[in-house]
């Protein structure tokens, strides 16, 4: 499948026929205005017709999650083989979205529960997710936030935004703010300028990140004016979302080049999707094309257990197989971290093939990507440094003026020398309940 100007011209001409005004294919406002939002328009523009019983069920899926495809993204669909087309599968509803399996959850990541104020998800110690709007130019059928995305009314009010900013200002630990949504680049440039400026005024916010699918689904949104606005607020990072190499065609490359030229470090988050990219060769091509465009593959996500996504999910083994095909075989910076976002709000958990095969008190046994088995001999003498957090007495140098004091949590706490914790126990176990029962009886 290749990028097709023929499709573009035909779709543009067809849209212009039905609307007045000049054709402005590369004007993102024109693209937004003419996004395909119903099945009739989709059929008219693509010539792809659905039998009436299927039509009816497709309409039902739209009641649960809206349809929106930019004319640009629509033009990437290969009409002659649409059933296997990765762009079609990501953007056009599937009647299997109506199936809810017993494992599907409304909010699998507990984003709502980890929300201290509206618009903020605060899960990790030093960074927060800020959700300002719920709209996107193209609605990914695999969206994990289907429950809240797509509602144009669900924009934060001015007061709610101020409350969210207050929260960030009050919590000193927050050094990284991630704007997500919806797609934050649906907001206009002046609003982005305002919100980024407000965040920049908070001294402890060291970096700001934007998560946006625009470079893939509406690359014309990345205008010179947008880029001039974003670069005023450095250090600013941008993570985008490409899932298939066919999405990386000339307009997308031009958008990425504009962002990279503005000094914005670019990352990419890919979702592993059955029938779209569950193939080591497709993934390798995608990651190679991304690094050619100065985009670092950041995360490969296991598809979440959100309602109506079962037909997109793969076994975890598929992801491990993909990572196995990359590590060692290609540039280290072309390999993303494969993560499972823990159901129940545990956050992202990295998973990898095993490279450490065995170990003794003085040797570890490792294997490489070729299957070579090797040993690493550990040092005969290593003077461990027992940290009591008194850097003045430690022979290592740490300039405490710059070093931020922090609490240890999690497994890091178990490993530390200055904390007495030796184990973590779930709050409710039968054993603990029996203990409590006995204690009550003895009272
Ligand atoms: C993914 C995510 C982040 C950012 O995590 P990184 O690993 O730093 O990219 C922050 N907050 C929430 C709730 C997230 O889901
Ligand atoms: S761009 Fe992101 S938030 Fe919007 S529909 Fe796609 S996955 Fe969901």
Image (cartoon, rainbow, N blue to C red):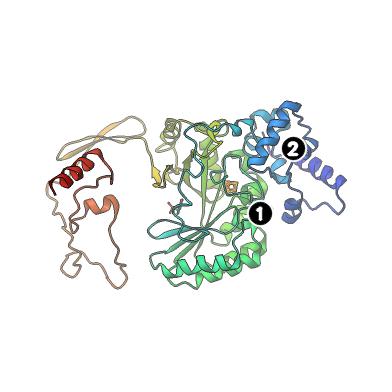
Kindly state the secondary structure of the residue where label 1 is placed: loop
**What residue is shown at x 61% (from left), y 59% (from top)?**
155
Q: Is residue 105 left or right of residue 6?
A: left
The mark found on residue 429 in the picture is none
- Circle count: 2
Query: Would you name the residue on which mark 2 appears?
Result: 39
Query: Would you name the residue on which mark 1 appears?
Result: 152
Q: Given contact means CB atoms under 8 Å apart, are the residues at marks 2 and 1 in contact?
A: no
Work out whether mark 2 precedes mark 1 in sequence or the reverse, and give the earlier one. Answer: 2
- Closest to the camera, between mark 2 and mark 1, is 1
Q: Around disc 2, counting alpha carbons within 10 Å, would you say few (fewer than 14), some (14 to 19), or many (20 or more)?
A: many
Q: Is residue 252 left or right of residue 80?
A: left
x then y, percent, for residue 419: 19, 57
**What residue is shown at x 54% (from left), y 69% (from top)?**
162
x then y, percent, for residue 177: 48, 61
**What residue is shown at x 15% (from left), y 40% (from top)?**
362
* Quarter of the rendering containing residue 141: top right
Nearest the viewer among 166 and 372 is: 166
Q: Around disc 1, counting alpha carbons within 10 Å, would you say few (fewer than 14), some (14 to 19), or many (20 or more)?
A: few
* Mark 1 sits near ligand 2, with its Cβ under 8 Å away: no
x then y, percent, for residue 278: 52, 32
Give the spatial CA distance, label 2 vs label 1. 20 Å
Say if 106 sits above or below 32 in the image.
above
Quadrant position of the N terminus in the picture: top right
Kindly state the secondary structure of the residue where label 2 is placed: helix
Nearest the viewer among 111 and 32 is: 111
Say if 400 sits above or below 78 in the image.
below
* Quarter of the rendering containing residue 343: top left
Say if 358 sits above or below 418 in the image.
above
Nearest the viewer among 432 and 360 is: 432
x then y, percent, for residue 58: 69, 33
Q: Is residue 304 left or right of residue 5?
A: left
């Amino acid at each position: 499948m290749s990028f097709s100007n023929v499709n573009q011209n035909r779709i543009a001409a067809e849209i212009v026929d039905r609307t007045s005004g000049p054709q402005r294919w590369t004007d993102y406002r024109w693209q937004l205005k003419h996004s395909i939002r119903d099945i009739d328009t989709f059929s008219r523009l693509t010539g792809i017709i659905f039998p009436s019983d299927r039509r009816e069920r497709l309409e039902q899926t739209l009641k649960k999650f809206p349809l929106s495809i930019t004319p640009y993204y629509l033009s990437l669909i290969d009409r002659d083989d649409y059933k296997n087309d990765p762009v079609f599968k990501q953007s056009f509803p599937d009647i299997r979205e109506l199936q809810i399996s017993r494992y599907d959850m409304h909010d699998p990541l507990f984003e709502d529960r980890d929300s201290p104020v509206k618009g903020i998800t605060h899960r990790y110690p030093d960074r927060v997710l800020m959700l300002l709007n719920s709209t996107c130019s193209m609605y990914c059928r695999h969206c994990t936030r289907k429950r809240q995305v797509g509602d144009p009314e669900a924009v934060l009010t001015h007061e709610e935004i101020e409350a969210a900013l207050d929260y960030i200002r009050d919590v000193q630990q927050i050094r990284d703010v991630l704007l997500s949504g919806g797609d934050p680049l649906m907001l206009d440039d002046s609003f982005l300028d305002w919100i980024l400026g407000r965040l920049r005024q908070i001294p402890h916010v060291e970096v700001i990140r934007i998560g946006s699918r625009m470079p893939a689904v509406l690359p014309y949104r990345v205008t010179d004016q947008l880029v001039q606005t974003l670069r005023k607020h450095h250090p600013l990072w941008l993570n985008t979302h490409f899932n298939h190499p066919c999405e990386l065609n000339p307009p997308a490359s031009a958008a990425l080049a504009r962002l990279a030229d503005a000094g914005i470090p670019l990352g990419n988050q890919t979702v592993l999707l059955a029938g779209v990219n569950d193939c080591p060769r497709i993934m390798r091509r995608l990651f190679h094309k991304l690094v050619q465009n100065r985009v670092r593959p950041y995360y490969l996500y296991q598809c979440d257990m959100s309602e109506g996504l079962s037909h997109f999910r793969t076994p975890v083994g598929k992801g491990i197989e993909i990572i196995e095909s990359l590590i060692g075989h290609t540039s280290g910076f072309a390999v993303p971290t494969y993560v499972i976002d823990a159901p129940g709000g545990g956050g992202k958990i990295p998973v990898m093939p095993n490279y450490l095969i065995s170990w003794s008190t003085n040797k570890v046994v490792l294997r490489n990507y070729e299957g070579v088995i090797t040993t690493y001999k550990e040092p005969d003498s290593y003077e461990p440094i027992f940290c009591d957090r008194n850097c003045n007495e430690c022979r290592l140098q740490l300039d405490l003026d710059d070093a931020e004091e922090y609490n240890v949590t999690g497994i890091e706490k178990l490993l530390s020398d200055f904390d007495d914790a030796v184990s973590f126990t779930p709050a409710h176990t039968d054993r603990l309940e029996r203990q409590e029962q006995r204690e009550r009886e003895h009272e």
